Image (cartoon, coloured by chain):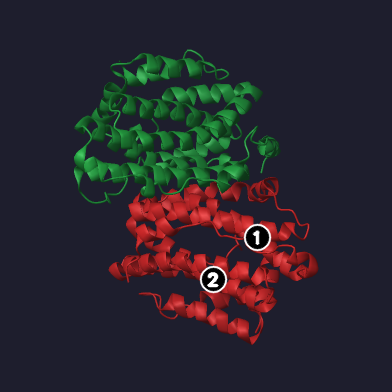
Amino acid sequence: MPRSIEVALDDMSIPAPDFDVRAYANDAHASYRDLLDLEAYASQPLSSDTVRALRYLQVVERGTMTHLRSVLVTATHKDARVTAFLITWAFEKYWIADALDQIIRANEGGTVDRTPFRTPVERTIRESIVANIVGLPMVAVHTALGTVDEWLMQAAYRRLIELEPHPQLADIVTRLLATKSRQLQFFEAQARHRLGESSRAQKVTRRRLAKTPWPIGARAEPSQNTEFFFRYLFGSQPSAITEIDELIDTLDGQNNLNLMKRAAAL
Amino acid sequence: MAFDIDRYTSTSKKVQWGDLDFTEFERNPLPDATLRSLRYMADVEYHTVCYLRDLLVTPSHKEVDVSAFMTMWNREEFWHGEALAKVLGAHEVTLDFDQLKATRLKLGWKDRLDPIKQSVLGNVIGKDFIAVHMIWGAANEWSAVAAYNRLADLEKHPVLSELLRRIAKQEARHVAFYATQARERLAKSKKAQVLARLALKGAWGPVGSSIMPADEVTHVMGHLFSGEEGLREIRKLDEHISRMPGLEGLTIVETSMKKYGVAA
């Protein structure tokens, strides 16, 4: 291995600041099935718009393996702390998607969707080559992507229950938000730390954030579904979108990207 | 028999050791040879995420059941690593995240090229490649069950042996998934059978041999599988594999053990 890359990779031993990965892995949230109270939807079903939004959220949440793939083919996978986090993160996301699926099916009927995932395969090779040349800043890129995606997804969940404050749905979504907040803590602490350390990381991250279709996973979805997601959840409250852009502005080197304004096209 | 993925995911747990009395290791410490083997096993368990990476660049991950399984399996293996690290820790052998990173760094360029190679192969060959992954996974998990049970038998340690049997039980559930998948997919496709034979014969090695130094592989495999009883275990593994559709007559485990100098 060329020495410069070895040195660069060695810098990755930066611990996750203020975040105990072992404690997180230890308290991971598993299945929500016992908490769902699905019978409630028989007497008080959700609106079809809410169900459609839930389906979109579910598809995006369950796409963890696709996201993991693009992360693991890069130098990021060398960092055992990050992978320990990601293993647990994928586990928690699996159960989040499962909870959403259960709620959708309690409202719509139907069986588990077993059609293969839609994923853009052809990008992987290019991704791997590019990322391995770029080397170190990929951890910053990936954790920044995770941070921005969490900001958007959490805002979406909050809007979902504001628009339809169904008691059982609100209860579960609040629990999902608690799980997701802890994931965000890790992504955000890592992203801020790593971006703060390197202007190169800031530049690479900036390029990647600008190129990413939001939310992560939207690339594989029909565009009308993504349009619905933004229009339904944020159309009547565009300030929620502005707030996320303002948060992104606080990441080193990422100001004025207006990612959400552009993605939402409101 | 079909593998019930829903049942598997809803009963997937991290391996438990809180009820085991680790102070037993102070009174009854493990010999160095065992610690060396445990260190290897822990490294391999933690390394599962890198193996997962190689799976993810192929079409395998798109299948809903496979994806669900991989999520749980990967986490269970991580916790096996944690449990074994805990045993090592009780003997003042530390295995922390930074050391794991060092192992991964040592793999260097070869490791970086793997996903590319796998991706090209997997996407050119397509669905039949999933069968190769599944039989490969089955061979590895069968080996893991045998290894943990062997070490538990050899050591007869009240705490270690109990922990190893718990780990082996989880590995057995992984076997069930991989073997069911492999059997179905191999039975359906002649091309998959040819590919699987080729891959296993040409490239299979004892679990961990692609990431650990050859000396360590020789130590662990010799420790666990030498002698007549060891050979019986090795042959059982080959029997499992060769009972798969199209894989009759394969003796990949015995052949590769000989390569590492493990003798009956």
Mark 1 to mark 2: distance in Å?
A: 15 Å
Indicate which label's residue lies in the foreground, 1 or 2. 1
Q: Nearer the viewer, residue B93 or B195?
A: B93
In the depicted structure, whether residue B191 falls above or below residue A35: below
In the picture, one chain is red; tell me its letter.
B
Amino acid tagged 2: Val
Label 1: chain?
B
| Residue B97 coordinates in the image, percent (x, y) | 66, 47
User: Which numbered dot is residue B145?
Assistant: 2
State which chain disc 2 sits on. B
Q: Secondary structure at mark 2?
A: helix
Q: Position of residue B168 (x, y in %)?
A: 55, 69
Of mark 1 and mark 2, the one earlier in the sequence is 1
Classify the position of the N terminus of chain A by image quarter.
top right
Question: Which numbered marker is on residue B84?
Answer: 1
Q: Residue at x 48, y 30 (%)?
A: A145
Image colour assigned to chain A: green
Residue at the image point whose x is 63% and y is 27% from the top: A193
Q: Amino acid at mark 1?
A: Leu
- The mark tally for this picture is 2
Q: Image quadrant of residue B35? A: bottom right
Query: A125 or A92: nearer the eye?
Result: A92
